Image (cartoon, helix red, strand yellow):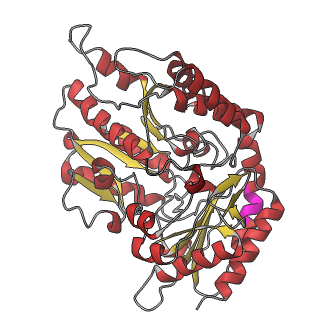
Amino acid sequence: MAGTDPQKKGRINSESLDAFWMPFTSNRHFKRNPLFISGGQGAYYSTPEGKQVFDGLSGLWCCGLGHGRTEIVNAVSRQMAQLDYSPAFNVGSPIAFELADRLKQIAPENLNHVFFTNSGSESADTSLKMARAYWRMKGQPGKTKLIGRSKGYHGVNLGGTSVGGIGGNRKLFGSCLDTDHLSHTLLRENAFSRGLPENGVELADELEELVALHDASNIAAVIVEPFSGSGGVIVPPQGYLKRLRELCTRHGVLLVFDEVITGFGRTGQAFAAQTFDTTPDIINLAKGLTNGTFPMGAVIAKSEIYAAFMEQELPEEAVEFPHGYTYSGHPVACSAALATLDLYETDQTYARVRQLAPYFEDAIHQLKGLPHITDIRNVGLAGALQFAPRGANPTIRPYEIFRKCFEAGVYVRCGGNTIQLAPPFISEKEELDNLFNILSDVIQATA
């Protein structure tokens, strides 16, 4: 049978290159100039040629604990031998309940009920369906409109695409759900701010204008990332999220935090909601939940939301929330997540991030003044460099920098007009120095 010869494992030819339609990739260019990763250990990837590449983005914002952690490998192996899969429809796997309780214990107050998904995109759509259904349970079926934010990213399913605010992710697909958008918080006067910028809290007041336009009786939820990752590490102004929380409460609108990128340590706490001292009604999770080792997501809802579904006048055997996935609460994913949560504790990850973040902040802002950089932004162990366009093309310069950095031994992400950084939590200061030295050299050598 084709593909079963172990001697052929890992070999890439033109046919296999053509077979894989790659996500969020310039397929034509990649297949003429492929970059491959074949291994990962600690804070480094390795290529098929044996070159070590520092992982400056923690995988894709998800592998903060580094790669190849034996604790997760062993937990997954044990679970696969004991129970590889069981359905979550009308039967339960004990490990899923254990994980849900662990998440409840570390979540902000009153966020007590966990619904498992398989990705951040599924978490986004689940939370939006949950919000609209909640208002129907409360006797307000007209509350269906969803409010996102310009430059926001909430995955690529239909709902997440609708509330997302990155034009390139929307234009091919036409009209989706009934949504509107707040402005982003990327202000010219805040360029090169360290951490949360001082200006812009008043941008949250745009919600008042949207309420005046649509009326609160028609709005189900506002969904935002505490800080925008894919949009280019767009950091909220001081007080912005608190103001948004106040306005949502005043107008009876649910507030959803998409913490797929910000959750599990990136800001120095388990959740950015805790870092920014603002509690939403729903939190979306994925990525760092399993340290990227197994596809898994989660939605954590306040008790009032869960109660609205449970208190419906339905037969006891009826399904209260007709939603879910074949792999919701997958037992192997749960084992990976529990082992990951253990490591966050034993490694004292969140404290380490808080200690390392000031060094990262100093290092990234030392690049100010290099050619073509128009802004530098950072929060926790995340940062972005924004570049001036080359002619009419705002994306080509970051793409070239990404490729050259990979060849020089560091992996960073190009997104739009930015280079994005999210080093592993296990990074040493010397590794950050090397990352920024290579970046500096590459930027200066890029026209």
Viewer-proximal residue among 28 and 8: 8
Which residue of the protein is positioned furthest toward the left in this rendering?
Answer: 142
- Position of the C terminus, as image quadrant, is bottom right
Q: How many marks?
A: 0
Q: Which residues are magenta?
A: 357-361
Q: Residue at x 33, y 30 (%)?
A: 324
Q: Is residue 233 left or right of residue 307?
A: right
The vertical placement of 174 against 400, above or below, is above
Task: For residue 380, say whether it is visible.
Answer: no
Viewer-proximal residue among 333 and 383: 333
The majority secondary structure of the magenta stretch comes to helix
Viewer-proximal residue among 47 and 225: 47
The vertical placement of 279 against 361, above or below, is above
Q: x, y percentage for residue 367?
A: 70, 77
Q: x, y percentage for residue 341?
A: 65, 33
Q: x, y percentage for residue 6?
A: 58, 49
Task: For residue 335, say whether it is visible.
Answer: yes
Q: Is residue 287 left or right of residue 439?
A: left
- Asked if the stretch drawn in magenta spans residue 248, the answer is no
Which residue of the protein is positioned furthest toward the top in this rendering?
Answer: 316
Q: Residue at x 51, y 84 (%)?
A: 388
